Image: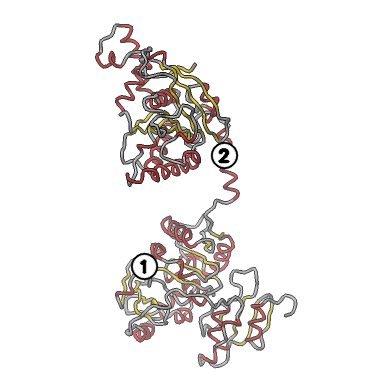
């Protein structure tokens, strides 16, 4: 090899005597023209720019044979594939084992081709498509409809799609019904093998593919973008790069992205210019500007980027700085529970905060108080309750705000001062309910939770939402017999919602009893019940431990709980503070 040669360049030079290379394009007498009985050979053109997506692509200027990449050239010339750069002997090809019926439409296609009229050929010319390309793609006419043959991998046609020349929506399938649906709805299917180790276009609509073929690009077509949903990426396994070019519609774009997600890094979605009209297609572009089609398409190809499941670096940095700016704002720093020692210990209500405690320790009371106080400060809170019921929650909030026993509120037996306090507290509660939403839905799912968060953020025009879950062990599970895996699954979802929507969580959990049936006196991470994932998912794990004897004759208002931070991602663990029961007003006083 001389300087600048590559294995592919040397391969073509070896098998094309008289080849001349100028500007990274090889030209030689076409060896296929004589085989096709077309007299003097036309030129065979090979693209040899290693930086091009179409490096190694050959085609005859007379279109005597379909073009392709080196492996297809070797097969067509009878050259041993093992001598071709990039050949892999162990490859298995999709659909090679398929069985096809004996009867086909091959002869009928010849008759349909003979019926193509001069008027139809003129219409194709307006799309920039010459009669040679129409003949190459074996397009026919049945007297009313254009006939697009869907040739299968064995070279035979068993079904064709008939499309009205002026109304594309007017179409039907003709031939063997078994070939009317997927996986057979790929027009120009044989092109896939021709593009092994190379590049292939996937376009929407047969007529758009004709525009591409006229320009010399290899490609296949699907009748409409919805067919992409059933296109198995395994069919295109050995194609190196796939350009997906759909109509300029929201639906087609969504289908292209869904296919790219399944097919992976090799896919590049070709986007239309921002000023392109909706429903723009290659045929419409060619009709509007026949001479500018090639330049416009070239620009679209150059701007196409490999489809990635990751955001672009610039978008990722923008999101980071945007979130950083939000977190430096007042809304972020207002996310406090109202318990100053707790807020100091964990830096406010951010991330996933899980609170464990023994039965009747006051976990619900603790979080109801925090939720109500935040709502009064116009912080949106969604309280998922599977323990108490919304009526009891509202009554306890009202009791604490009015400093009245729940029994007195229910009975209405109170003096004028108490009635005035109740009236004031009732107005506070009513106003807070725009920001406090209590949900008792036993069919709750992560998707529904996301919709709830989106709604309340939009409704309250807030950047952040606090979600209270009472309790983790009573969240709905599909299979109640697999509760532990269900809890772990919910924790994974809460992590995702935290990261996607910036929600803060207050989650109540149960504690595990020891072998003696008693709860541990010293709070620790291993005290939590039913999930080893709490230690991995919780940003802060807290335990509310009772410091009073339920059987002692002490007054309820003298009962004190201790709150411990037993594990944290960012804060040192230890005792947070002491909380005295604010009896009988359903709250705690931080000492």
The residue carrying pointer 2 sits among few (fewer than 14), some (14 to 19) or many (20 or more) residues within 10 Å by Cα, namely few
Q: Quadrant of residue 356?
A: top left
Q: Is residue 450 left or right of residue 443?
A: right
In front here: 469 or 558? 558
- Residue extending furthest toward the top: 416
The residue carrying pointer 1 sits among few (fewer than 14), some (14 to 19) or many (20 or more) residues within 10 Å by Cα, namely few
At 36% across and 21% down in the image, what residue appears?
A: 397
Residue 10 on image: x %, y %: 67, 81
User: Sequence-wise, which precedes: disc 2 or disc 1?
Assistant: 1
Q: Nearer the viewer, mark 2 or mark 1?
A: 2
In front here: 275 or 403? 403
Eyeballing the image, is 271 above or below 415? below
- Residue extending furthest toward the right: 3
- Judging by the rendered image, the residue that carries numbered circle 1 is 168
Q: Is residue 96 left or right of residue 61?
A: left
Is residue 459 visible in the rendered image? The answer is no
Quadrant assignment for the N terminus? bottom right
- Judging by the rendered image, the residue that carries numbered circle 2 is 322
Q: Separation of disc 2 and disc 1 at Cα?
A: 46 Å
Is residue 219 visible in the rendered image? The answer is yes
Residue 410 on image: x %, y %: 26, 17
Secondary element under disc 1, as helix, strand or loop, is loop
In front here: 212 or 422? 422
At 33% across and 31% down in the image, what residue appears?
A: 387
Secondary element under disc 2, as helix, strand or loop, is helix
Q: Is residue 343 left or right of residue 450?
A: right
Eyeballing the image, is 36 above or below 52? below
Residue 305 on image: x %, y %: 56, 59
């Amino acid at each position: 090899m001389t300087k600048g040669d590559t294995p592919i360049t040397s391969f073509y030079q070896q098998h094309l005597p008289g080849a001349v290379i100028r500007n990274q394009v090889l030209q030689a007498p076409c060896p296929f023209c004589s085989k096709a009985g077309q007299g003097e050979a036309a030129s065979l053109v090979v693209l040899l720019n290693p930086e091009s997506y179409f490096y190694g692509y050959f085609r005859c200027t007379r279109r005597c044979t379909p073009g392709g990449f080196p492996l297809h050239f070797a097969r067509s010339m009878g050259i041993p594939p093992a001598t071709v750069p990039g050949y892999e002997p162990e490859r298995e090809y999709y659909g090679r084992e398929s069985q096809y019926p004996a009867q086909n439409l091959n002869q009928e296609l010849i008759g349909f081709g003979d019926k193509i009229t001069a008027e139809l050929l003129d219409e194709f010319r307006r799309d920039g498509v010459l009669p040679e390309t129409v003949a190459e793609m074996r397009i026919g006419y049945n007297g009313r409809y254009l006939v697009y043959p869907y040739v299968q991998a064995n070279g035979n046609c068993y079904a064709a799609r008939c499309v009205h020349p002026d109304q594309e929506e007017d179409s039907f399938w003709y031939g063997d019904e078994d070939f009317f649906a997927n996986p057979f709805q790929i027009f120009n299917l044989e092109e896939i093998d021709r593009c092994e180790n190379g590049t292939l276009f996937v376009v929407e609509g047969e007529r758009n593919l004709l525009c591409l073929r006229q320009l010399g690009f290899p490609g296949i077509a699907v009748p409409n973008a919805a067919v992409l949903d059933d296109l198995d990426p395994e069919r295109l396994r050995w194609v190196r790069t796939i350009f997906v070019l759909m109509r300029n519609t929201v639906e087609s774009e969504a289908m292209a992205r869904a296919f790219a997600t399944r097919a992976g890094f090799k896919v590049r979605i070709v986007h239309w210019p921002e000023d392109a009209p909706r429903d723009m297609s290659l045929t419409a572009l060619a009709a509007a500007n026949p001479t500018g089609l090639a330049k416009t398409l070239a620009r679209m190809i150059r701007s196409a980027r490999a489809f990635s499941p990751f955001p672009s670096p610039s978008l990722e940095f923008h999101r980071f700085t945007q979130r950083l700016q939000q977190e430096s704002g007042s809304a972020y720093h207002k996310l406090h529970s109202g318990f100053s020692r707790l807020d100091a210990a964990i830096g406010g209500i951010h991330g996933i905060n899980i609170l464990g405690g023994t039965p009747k320790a006051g976990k619900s009371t603790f979080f109801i108080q925090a939720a109500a106080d935040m709502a009064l400060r116009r912080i949106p809170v969604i309280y998922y309750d599977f323990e108490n019921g919304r009526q009891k929650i509202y009554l306890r909030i009202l009791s604490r705000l009015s400093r009245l026993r729940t029994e007195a509120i229910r009975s209405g037996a109170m003096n004028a001062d108490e009635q005035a306090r109740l009236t004031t507290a009732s107005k506070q509660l009513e106003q807070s309910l725009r920001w406090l939403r209590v949900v008792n839905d036993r069919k709750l799912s992560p998707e529904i939770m996301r919709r709830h968060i989106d709604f309340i953020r939009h409704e309250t025009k807030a950047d952040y939402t606090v979600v209270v879950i009472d309790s983790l062990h009573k969240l709905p599970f599909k299979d109640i017999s697999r509760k532990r895996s269900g809890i772990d699954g919910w924790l994974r979802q809460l992590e995702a919602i935290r990261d996607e929507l910036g929600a803060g969580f207050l989650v109540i959990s149960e504690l595990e009893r020891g072998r003696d049936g008693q709860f541990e006196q010293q709070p620790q991470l291993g005290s939590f019940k039913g999930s080893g994932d709490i230690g991995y998912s919780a940003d802060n794990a807290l335990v509310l431990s009772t410091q009073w004897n339920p059987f002692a004759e002490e007054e309820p208002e003298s009962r004190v709980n201790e709150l411990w931070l037993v594990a944290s991602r960012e804060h040192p663990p230890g005792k947070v503070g002491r909380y005295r029961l604010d009896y009988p007003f359903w709250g705690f006083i931080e000492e």
